[in-house]
Image: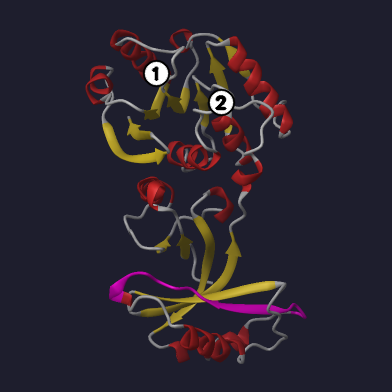
Amino acid sequence: MIANDYVYELASNDEERGLRLLETRTLLESNVKYRLVRSKAAVDPSRSPFIKSRLSVLFEGDRLEDIADRVGVIELNGATFKVHALDHDDPAEGGKFDYDRKRAMEREIGYRFRGKAEMRSPDREFGFARMGGRWLFGELARGQAVWLKHKEKPREYSTALSTRVARAVVNIAVPRIEGVRAIDPCCGIGTVLVEAASMGIEIEGRDVNPLAAVGARENLAHFGYGGSVPVTLGDMREITGQYDAAVIDMPYNLCSVLSPREKLEMLRSARAFANRIVVVTLEDLDSIVAEAGFDILDRCTVNKGKFVRQVLICE
């Protein structure tokens, strides 16, 4: 296999396209805007709500025949297999394959395997794609919609982040998990905490609202993370620990109307306890972020019904 060489197949709706692109820039370290992204970043495809599959590149060639000639060396050891052609939406790559050509190419590759094909439930899946004028072939891993399992919580807020958005925001805040300690200092019912915990991220929660803190603990326990994610009660301006990253979903409901001074105090306190913050806000906070001592490195907007949120990466 070509070391650290992957092709990610991405998908999103129009409302979340900006969020997908921001996650792609941070998680996959790529500015590519199309559905296929080649990256050196090794990311579990189930981490992102936007990754459909990951192709671990085994070899490449100038022609489809070049990769077809090489698949015979793959040892299946009795396992069944299936081959997929990955469609591209980049006009420079010729766009999507038409149905007949796609099936013909898959057969051409599949005939060269020394093993039994299985269309419904194969033991192993392989794929190929056309990128940069080259043909890439490798083993395919499918992303699992982990976030979907977290939609049904014991405690819910109608204005809380969706699990898809929360998962992407966590990936933007913590693109590399190892050795990172994170916090959600306005955790609400714990949507961000659940997504982070399910990815193995070391994170803590905190909220000034006792009902929210109780709800977060209940939701975490419901999904089996009650013992691994501490949730404390208190104002974020009183935090004294140090963290590598923080996710701050700024309060915005009718019971949490904050003055500009309070918003500034919140972000100034974050400046003291976190090196990197991702701010989710319904308002324009650019001047307050700057006054708090942060630079905005990247950003996007994401819609949820009537809400238009901004996601800001700040350091």
What stretch of residues is rendered in magenta? 77-92
Q: Secondary structure at mark 1?
A: helix
Q: Amino acid at mark 2?
A: Tyr
Mark 1 or mark 2, whichever is nearer to me? 2
Horizontal side, residue 133 vs residue 148: left or right? left
The residue pinned by badge 2 equals 157
Quick one: 26 or 86, which is closer to the camera? 86
Place of residue 172 in the rendered image (x, y in percent of width and height, measured from the top left): 43, 40
Colour approach in the figure: secondary structure
Quick one: 192 or 239, which is closer to the camera? 192
Quick one: 209 or 288, which is closer to the camera? 209
Q: Is residue 79 magenta?
A: yes
Q: Secondary structure at mark 2?
A: loop
Place of residue 282 in the rendered image (x, y in percent of width and height, measured from the top left): 35, 28
Q: Amino acid at mark 1?
A: Ala
The relative height of residue 165 versus residue 206 in the rendered view (above or below) is below
Residue drawn at x 45%, y 38% is: 169
Quadrant in which the C terminus is drawn: top left
The relative height of residue 192 versus residue 83 in the rendered view (above or below) is above
The relative height of residue 35 versus residue 129 in the rendered view (above or below) is above
The residue pinned by badge 1 equals 270
The dot on residue 110 is: none
Residue drawn at x 53%, y 67% is: 56
Place of residue 206 in the rendered image (x, y in percent of width and height, measured from the top left): 55, 17
| Mark 2 neighbour class, 10 Å CA radius: few under 14, some 14 to 19, many 20 or more | few
Q: Is residue 72 magenta?
A: no
